[in-house]
Image (tube, grey):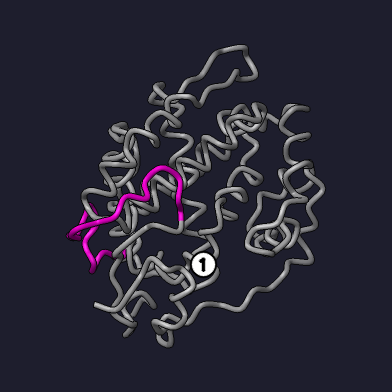
C-alpha cells in the first residue's frame, strides 16, 4: 500500500492567509476547490507543505538547480524569472489546496507570472511560456522533481497512485495556466518525457551559474539553501552536480515524514489547515 493511503489526520484548507501575496481575502465559505480532498496529489502534498511555505519553495529551487538545461537554464539566466517561478509555485499550491474562490483569485497573478517567463536557447531561439514546447519542458521537470522530492521525504507511491498524482498535477497546471495538451498524464509518460528532456544538451550559461551561486546562500524557513541542495544531492544529475560544484556523496538527511503519524499539531504551523 502506498504511504499516501495510510490513516492520516483529516484536514481541509480553510484559508491561505499566511501567503499574504495579494490573495488574502477573507473567505465566507469554502468548497472542495479544484482538487478533491481524497486526491492523491492533495494528501501527498499536505505534510510536505512546511518545507514549501515560507515565501519560496526550496524544492522548486532544487528543480532549477538540478535542471540547468535549456528552458530552465534560460529562465535562471534572468533574475526576474526567479520571482516568476516563485509566483508559479504559490499558484500551484493554491490550485491544489484552495477553495474555488481562492483558486480563481490567484489565476490572474499566476498566469501573468507564467506569461513573463522567457529566454534564449543555445541556438539563439527565443522561448516564451506560450511556446508549447517550453511549457512542456518546464512543467514536466517540475512535476517529476517535486514528486521525487516528496517520495524522498514520505515514501514511494505505487503505480496507480503515481498515475493519479500525475493526472491531478496536469489538471491543476491546466486550470491555472491553460496549457496542458502536451503534458504527460501517467507516470510512465512522465518518465519517458523527462528522460528525453534530460538527454538533451546541457546548457549552462555564465549568468545562470552566477544566479545559482547567489541563491545557494539563502535560507528557507531558517534552513540554509546549501543544506537543502545537499539534502537531495544524490538525486541530482551527475553532470549538473559537477558543473555547479555540488557534492553528491555527502547528502544531508532530513527526517522522513511518516504519514501514519501525522497529526493536526504537525500541520498547525501552516495556519492554513484545520480539522474538519
Q: Is residue 2 magenta?
A: no
State whether residue 273 is above or below residue 131: below
Return the x and y of residue 199 as percentages of the image width and height: 58, 37
**Mark 1 neighbour density, 10 Å: few (under 14) some (14–19) many (20 or more):** some
The part of the chain drawn in magenta is 19-40
Give the residue at x 47% y 51%.
144
Farthest residue to the bottom: give it: 261
Horizontal side of residue 135 vs 148, given as left or right: left
State whether residue 47 is above or below residue 205: below
**Which SS does the magenta portion mostly show?**
loop
Give the residue at x 30% y 35%.
180
Residue 230 picture quarter: bottom right
Q: Is residue 32 magenta?
A: yes
Residue holding disc 1: 50
State whether residue 236 is above or below residue 36: above
Q: Looking at this view, is 101 or 252 the one in front?
A: 101
Q: Secondary structure at mark 1?
A: helix
Give the residue at x 49% y 64%.
150
Amino acid at each position: 500500500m502506498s504511504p499516501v493511503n495510510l490513516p492520516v489526520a483529516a484536514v481541509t484548507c480553510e484559508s491561505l492567509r499566511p501567503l499574504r501575496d495579494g490573495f488574502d481575502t477573507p473567505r465566507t465559505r469554502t468548497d472542495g476547490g479544484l482538487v478533491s480532498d481524497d486526491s492523491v496529489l492533495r494528501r501527498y502534498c499536505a505534510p510536505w507543505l512546511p518545507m514549501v511555505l515560507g515565501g519560496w519553495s526550496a524544492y522548486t529551487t532544487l528543480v532549477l538547480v538540478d535542471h540547468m538545461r535549456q528552458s530552465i537554464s534560460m529562465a535562471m539566466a534572468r533574475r526576474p524569472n526567479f520571482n516568476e517561478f516563485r509566483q508559479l509555485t504559490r499558484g500551484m499550491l493554491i490550485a491544489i489546496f484552495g477553495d474555488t474562490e481562492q483558486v480563481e483569485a490567484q489565476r490572474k497573478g499566476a498566469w501573468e507570472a507564467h506569461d513573463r517567463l522567457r529566454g534564449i536557447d543555445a541556438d539563439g531561439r527565443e522561448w516564451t511560456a506560450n511556446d508549447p514546447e517550453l511549457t512542456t519542458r518546464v512543467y514536466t521537470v517540475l512535476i517529476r522533481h517535486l514528486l521525487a522530492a516528496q517520495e524522498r521525504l514520505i515514501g514511494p507511491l505505487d503505480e496507480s497512485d503515481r498515475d493519479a498524482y500525475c493526472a491531478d498535477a496536469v489538471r491543476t497546471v491546466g486550470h491555472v495556466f491553460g496549457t496542458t495538451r502536451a503534458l504527460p498524464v501517467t507516470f510512465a509518460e512522465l518518465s519517458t518525457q523527462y528522460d528525453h528532456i534530460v538527454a538533451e544538451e546541457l546548457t549552462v550559461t555564465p549568468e545562470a551559474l552566477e544566479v545559482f551561486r547567489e541563491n545557494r546562500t539563502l535560507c528557507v524557513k531558517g534552513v540554509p539553501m546549501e543544506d537543502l541542495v545537499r539534502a537531495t544531492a544524490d538525486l541530482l544529475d551527475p553532470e549538473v552536480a559537477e558543473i555547479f560544484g555540488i557534492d553528491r556523496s555527502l547528502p544531508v538527511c532530513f527526517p522522513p515524514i511518516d504519514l501514519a503519524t501525522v497529526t493536526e499539531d504537525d500541520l498547525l504551523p501552516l495556519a492554513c489547515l484545520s480539522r474538519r
